[in-house]
């Protein structure tokens, strides 16, 4: 075999191996692995929780907004209603609606 024929054969074999490995990778080995588990958010007491705890518990609230919630709480005292969270920059009506049943005051 000529050198160019060997190179061409090697390239073709490599392409076939790559194509077959991507086909295998695309097929799940276990059907259970493809199930999507729903996110569960447990209630969080916004008057006691730390910023990381608040960020982990509330949908749409990252660490920056959670830190703002804690800072607001320290400066103004405990939240009396969930709606009072809207006084914190970054928390609006949609955030409250996404977290109905998750925000606790006690």
Image (cartoon, rainbow, N blue to C red):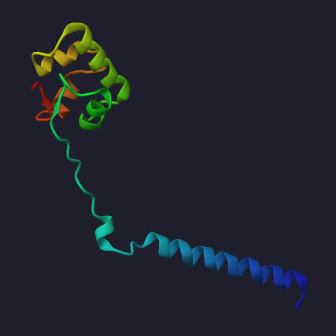
Q: Residue at x 23, y 28 (%)?
A: 49
Q: Residue at x 17, y 41 (%)?
A: 42
The mark tally for this picture is 0
Q: Quadrant of residue 62?
A: top left
Q: Quadrant of residue 6?
A: bottom right
Q: Nearer the viewer, residue 19 or 56?
A: 56
Residue at far top of view: 76
Q: Residue at x 23, y 21 (%)?
A: 92
Q: Is residue 44 left or right of residue 71?
A: left
Q: Quadrant of residue 105?
A: top left
Residue 13, percent from left and from top: 69, 81
| Whether residue 55 can be seen here | yes
Q: Is residue 12 above or below residue 97?
A: below
Residue 7, percent from left and from top: 82, 79
Q: Which quarter of the rendered picture does the C terminus lie within?
A: top left
Residue at far right of view: 2
Q: Is residue 104 left or right of residue 10?
A: left
Q: Which quarter of the rendered picture does the N terminus lie within?
A: bottom right
Q: Nearer the viewer, residue 10 or 58?
A: 58
Residue at far bottom of view: 1
Q: Is residue 82 above or below residue 27?
A: above
Q: Is residue 58 left or right of residue 2?
A: left
Residue 83, percent from left and from top: 13, 18
Q: Residue at x 26, y 15 (%)?
A: 88
């Amino acid at each position: 075999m000529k050198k160019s024929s060997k190179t061409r054969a090697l390239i073709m074999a490599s392409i076939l191996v790559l194509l077959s490995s991507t086909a295998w990778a695309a097929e799940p080995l276990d059907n259970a692995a493809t199930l999507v588990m729903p996110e569960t958010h447990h209630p969080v007491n916004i008057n006691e929780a730390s910023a990381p705890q608040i960020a982990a518990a509330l949908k749409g609230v990252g660490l920056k907004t959670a830190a703002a919630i804690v800072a607001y709480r320290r400066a103004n005292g405990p939240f009396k209603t969930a709606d009072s969270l809207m006084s914190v920059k970054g928390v609006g009506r949609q955030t409250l609606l996404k977290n109905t049943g998750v925000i606790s005051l006690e």
